[in-house]
Image (cartoon, grey):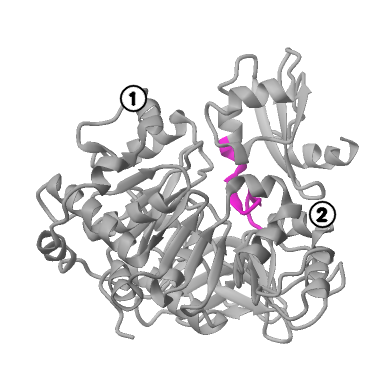
Amino acid sequence: MIMPNSAVRLLDAAAEKYGNKTAVTDESGSFTFNDLRSRGLSIGTRLISFAAAGYMPEPVMVYLPKSRFCIASFMGAMYSGNPYVPIAYDMPANRIQKIVDKLDGRGHLITDERGMETVKTMDIPNGIHIHLYSELSEAEADEKAVYEVLDRVIDTDPIYIMFTSGSTGEPKGVTVPHRGAVDYALWVKRTFGIDENTRLGNQAPFYFDNSIFDIYSMLLTGAEMNIIPETLFMFPSKLPEFIRDNEITVIFWVPTVMINVANSGALSEVKMPSLKTVAFCGEVMPNTQLNIWRQNHPDAVYANLYGPTEISDVCTYYIVDREFNDADPLPIGRACENMRIIILNEKNEIAKTNEQGELCVIGTGVSLGYWNRPDLTEKAFIQNPANPFYEERIYRTGDLAYINDEGLIMYDGRMDNQVKVKGNRIELGEIECAAMAVEGVKGACAVFDAENERIVLFVESCCALVLRKFNNELKKYIPKYMLPGKLVVMEAFPHTANDKIDRVTLKKSLSDL
């Protein structure tokens, strides 16, 4: 396949080949590939009519409930030659405002009637155009105008910007090029045998990069993408029934969901004969629950994938080929095609076998950096210190890893206080910043309790604080997935000799909670 200049060309090809075949289904209906293309062209046409002079892209924020309408909006953004920016529908206005501010007063925002009420409470610059999805999708398409713009796109232009948690409380916009998403889709197709008969069971939110697996393998191959109703994840025992009843063949889920399903006992009660591939990424998958899946559904292929948001989703993979004991580490495997992994030790030299170091990534999937933050980009995306001969850009993940005697990459934790909870990457510092905005809080320190898979928030306060009420206040500043599971109120924090909060002591106290 010749690499297209824009990933939306995959939709053109799919519509031509699979036209009236279902592309994406949600709980209220479905779009065929023709439907998706038609609506994308209408949206793209309207966005182009607002275009400013010049060739720089204008980010298109998509602030809609997770649905097929989001996918159509993503396509519309690409047809207009612009990157899309997925916004969680339950995200507090305060945090959306921070994302708007990062876009530097240019772009678009697509929402619905309910979302418009939230938008009205925000300070939106005049350079950001606000649109109702219903009006955009019904506009008359002008294919000539769309393709004049689309022909000017190059494969290194951004396809999407995903905002992740920032340690200072400021979200960072990871900017990924078209070629990264397309190359990744090609790898997914080859590795897992995705084709027009595949039925994908989508779990990942669209603001989470795991969704790229589902969206772009669907566009590339003509597969059907089923958006699993979000309410079902509150009842994990029902998920196998959804897979069975909808004849899902491939799932790519975060381990937390798989753990909940395994613990529910449903895997021994509900057979899923259609399920061929079970891939997971975003957190460490415990072997206990993985073995429950494998024992009850031994014919499926199980794959442990790894990749930060700064990569077009995934850069390593491991096909699980044996049963692991509960205490055994599960490899993250080997580099995907067109990707290379190097482990740098403390001397910035290539680590030896079994020597721990920072996992760094080179290749097509590496993102362009952080939107409108050249300072942060310069720190994380650097010249390969092991290559003095020519320019070779690498991304320093901040993850610790080593390569074992079998040549497999083993994940070994984080270098900083960034954690992943239910597949969402979270900087504990952002939770601390939000907590400091709550009345009565003098100090805040967030710690990840790995044993209980929860965030514990320590606060300095003279007030009697209750977790439920405290979290209701935090919801004004951070999304639900960042809310702490335990609140500990202290009159004063322990401090180190240099007067920093003694996080080590606080972490040790977790065993007493």
Segment tinted magenta in the rendering: 414-430
Disc 2 residue type (three-letter): Ser
Disc 1 residue type (three-letter): Lys
Q: Could you say which is closer to the camera, residue 93 or residue 427?
A: 93
Q: Where is residue 288, by image quadrant?
A: bottom right
Q: Which residue is mark 2?
A: 264
Callout in the foreground (2, 1): 2
Q: Which residue is depicted at the point 71% across and 17% down?
A: 461
| Residue 138 percent location from the top left of the image | 23, 47
308 left or right of 145 in image: right
Residue 294 visible within the image = yes
Q: Work out how far the residue at label 2 is from the one at label 1, CA to CA, in angstroms.
A: 42 Å
Q: Where is residue 306, by image quadrant?
A: bottom right
Give the structural element (helix, strand or loop) at label 1.
loop
Task: Mark 2 and mark 1 in contact? Answer it, CB < 8 Å.
Answer: no
| Residue 370 percent location from the top left of the image | 38, 53
Marks 2 and 1, the one that precedes in the sequence = 1
Q: Which residue is depicted at the point 38% across and 64% down?
A: 32
| Residue 472 percent location from the top left of the image | 62, 24
Q: Which residue is mark 1?
A: 120
